[in-house]
Amino acid sequence: MQLTQTAADGLKRQYKVVITAQDLAVRFDTEVEQLKGRVQLNGFRPGKVPVAHIRKLYGRSIMAEVVQNSVTEAQKKIAEEAGSKLAAEPKVALPEDEATITKVLAGEADLDFAVDVEILPKFDVKDHSHISIVKEVAEVPENDVDEAIQRMANAARTFTPRADKEKSKDGDKLTIDFVGTINGIAFDGGTGTSDLVLGSGQFIPGFEEQLVGSKMGDQKVVKVTFPDDYQVVDLAGKAAEFAVTVKAIQAPEEIAIDNELAKKLGVESLAKMREIVKGSMQAELMDVSRQKQKRQLLDGLDAIYTFDLPPTMVEQEFAAVWNQVISDMQREGKSFADDPKGEAELKAEYQRIAQRRVRLGLVLSEIGEKAEVKISDEEISRALVQRARQFPGQEKEFFEFYRKNPQALAEIRAPLFEEKVVDHILAGLTVVEKPVSRDELMAVEPVEAEAKAEKPKKAKAKKAE
């Protein structure tokens, strides 16, 4: 096999590969000999099929396999020749001329083809000790725990039917049929049957108030205006009418927040339920704080690393990001005309996001490799179990999928690896704790488009090893 580099441009390399007809013939004969001992044909004893007969029956398919194996071998040698890990699968340009292909498969011509590759950039891991991290720490207010338990109590509350002519009151549960129209025309999603607790704020502002005082069997026209920021753009800010029929009215029964309520919800006591609820809320706050620390770290890393990026990795990442943008817009009923930046400017922003994700992914991958960060089988198993819980009733199929598709485990391993690398880096930095209120911690900070790149792409870098 002759391997010659013919071009180099940044991280791109091109190689010419020549496998002589003589080399192919030797490989072909080896395959035939191996097949001779396995093939079984009527009229011949096992292992006694003449080589000429095997060549006649299977010659072309054997040579096709030899060619494929030779191409695979060439790719491995190119990776070694490049002296770096490949950023993507090599692009192989085999001969397209049918006459040439026929000669190669017949063992009458050399196999001559080109291979284009992109390599991962080489860079030194830098000193990160100057990156400053502020860890916001908040405690769960007791009144937030009270409110959460009250919501749980409300959800567990039972209702009893009111008398036929008895009027509905705030807090009652109504079963209603409704048909919504705008300018007399019904709109998508505006027709249905629903249970509605008056005062719960489930429906459009002003809807529930107009049903207070209704009786079973009443037919009412409820007039409302959709909020300006309503998620369905076509309905936002528009006035609508709903023809409502009250099918049933149920009054709420009294419910005490005590040990009996806790037991009804599967907890031994009210004190234990408060402990569980507060612990869950505290874990949520800790997770938000963690994500903010991670964002500060990624911003710090992004500021100190600059190197060329493999074009294919950036293109693939941009395609994934942009497809998500399009999907979100379609789901919300929006178009580029709704954004003052326009499609071209948005594409440029998300192109920068894709570049940031790829760069940070490569940085985290390199730091993790240098630090010998490993993900154990036990950690992967725990992550699989957690993810399987998202598919109740389908756990068996879930685990079967991952058993049959080991490559899919990269989707499980990648975030675990990323978090452990982040932990490793944070352990070497000065992290200053800052007490804040819950509202301050949970506040959404105004950020630029680049801030959306909080999940760097390093799985592809790992897979390319």
Image: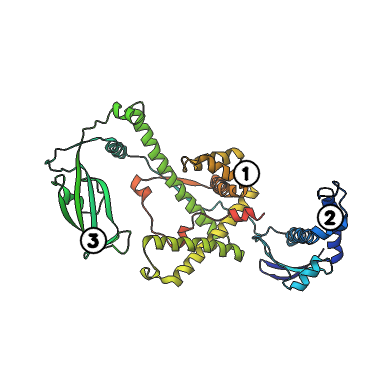
Residue 433 sits in quarter = top left
Decide if residue 56 is on the left or right side of residue 213.
Answer: right
- From the image, which quarter does the C terminus lie in? bottom right
Distance between mark 1 and mark 3 Cα atoms: 59 Å
Which residue is label 1 attached to? 374
Residue type, numbered disc 1:
Lys
Distance between mark 2 and mark 3 Cα atoms: 75 Å
Seen from the viewer's position, the closer of residues 336 and 110 is: 110
Vertical order, 440 against 8 (above or below): above
Mark closer to the chain start, 1 or 3: 3
- Horizontal and vertical percent for residue 269? 34, 26
Residue for point 53% across, 59% down: 357
Determine whether the residue tagged by mark 1 lies in a helix, strand or loop: loop
Q: Residue furthest front?
A: 43
* Mark 1 neighbour class, 10 Å CA radius: few under 14, some 14 to 19, many 20 or more: some
Determine whether the residue tagged by mark 3 lies in a helix, strand or loop: strand
Residue type, numbered disc 3:
Thr
**Residue 181, disc:** 3
Between circles 1 and 3, the one closer to the viewer is 3
Determine whether the residue tagged by mark 2 lies in a helix, strand or loop: helix
**Residue 32, disc:** 2
